[in-house]
Image (cartoon, rainbow, N blue to C red):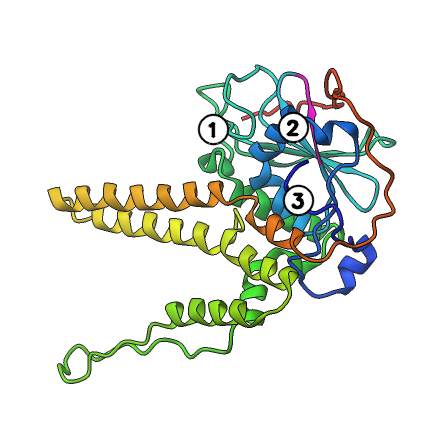
Amino acid sequence: MVAEDKNTPTASHADARRTSVDASAFAPLPDHRNVDTAWWQELWRNHTHITTPLRQRGLECDIEFGLSAYIVRVSLPDGSYLIIGPPQEPSCDRPPGDPQGWIVTRQHPDDQALFEVIYDSAPSADPGAPERPEARHGGNATHLIEAIDQRLIQLGLLPAVASSTASALMSAATPTLRAPKTPDVSDNADRTSVYVHGDALLALADRLNATESHADAAALLHQVLDPTSGLLERLGEFFEAAGEKAKEAEQDDGFDLHYDLEDAAATLRCLGEDLHTAVDRMRALAPARQTTSAALASGPSPGLPTAKIRTPGRTR
């Protein structure tokens, strides 16, 4: 079974609009027989950087096979759905979940006229055509999720609070901290700095030590490991920014430092990937709730259902 807690209570979409941010209230996993197969679980792991933040927002996700590559299908409260995947034509030989760019479309099974491209960071097939603005983000999932947040909030399909989940969670979990004091460099007697960001993490650790609930512990752990807005991802971005700043010096040591900081960012992201199931494993340590869902049918399926995908004609 995928290392996610099937017993986690799932709020309805109406409840999701009314309630405050709760990192433990994930949308449930798909309920079909493929969920217990090794090949499907591997596909799911390859797409958790997409599915986890969307499930955190109460949106149910599944992995399907499109025209030539695997895609994420996201159910929306109004009956429409999102298709998130790499370009389907031509096909790509990159591994599932790691494309050169993402295309997000919104469609409706009963309304063929409803078709819109929400995000498209795929490289242009026409070398002479101008790129879409988001093409510079390539396969980065952070900007993809932000674009989905923005559009769904505009449509009234997602509460505005969902797009700032990580910052809201951090505010709820840590005491109010004053902005760091910038020491007066002209005064050598007073060079004490206030490490406000380190203090915030220490407060988070104190809260984790004090909690008696594994569900609460999972919510706090999620603040660090969330693949798009968690602490590790933000630290990775910080080291990348520091590396770019070092490179601006155009000195040999500046370039060396740039590469060292890039390596640090990559190490942090690898750590996040290694621990991508830790939040769900922590949540699963909570006392099991009575489940009313029917048992999944046994035995692997010969293949995934083919998703109905309309490939947008991208005029560059």
- Above or below, 67 against 64 in this view is above
Q: Tell me which residue sits at (33%, 72%) in the image.
A: 195
Residue 231 % position (x, y): 46, 56
Residue with the mark numbered 2:
71
- Above or below, 108 against 198 in this view is above
Mark identifier at residue 109: none
Q: Residues within 10 Å of mark 1 (few under 14, many from 20)?
A: few
Write down the quadrant of residue 67 in the picture: top right
**Direction from residue 241 to residue 43 in the image, left or right:** right
Q: Are marks 1 and 3 in contact (CB under 8 Å)?
A: no
Q: Tell me which residue sits at (44%, 19%) in the image.
A: 127
**Direction from residue 298 to residue 315 in the image, left or right:** left
Residue with the mark numbered 1:
130
Question: Label 3 sits on what residue type?
Answer: Glu
Q: Please identify the quadrant where the N terminus is shown.
A: top right
Say which of 51 and 186 sits in front: 51
- Above or below, 151 against 33 in this view is below
Disc nearer the start of the sequence (2/3): 3
Q: Are marks 2 and 3 in contact (CB under 8 Å)?
A: no
Disc nearer the start of the sequence (1/3): 3
- Above or below, 65 against 254 in this view is above
Q: Which range of residues does the magenta coloring cover?
A: 62-67
Q: Secondary structure at mark 2?
A: strand
Q: Is residue 141 magenta?
A: no
Q: Residues within 10 Å of mark 2 (few under 14, many from 20)?
A: many
**Direction from residue 97 to residue 118 in the image, left or right:** right
SS assignment for the magenta stretch, majority: strand
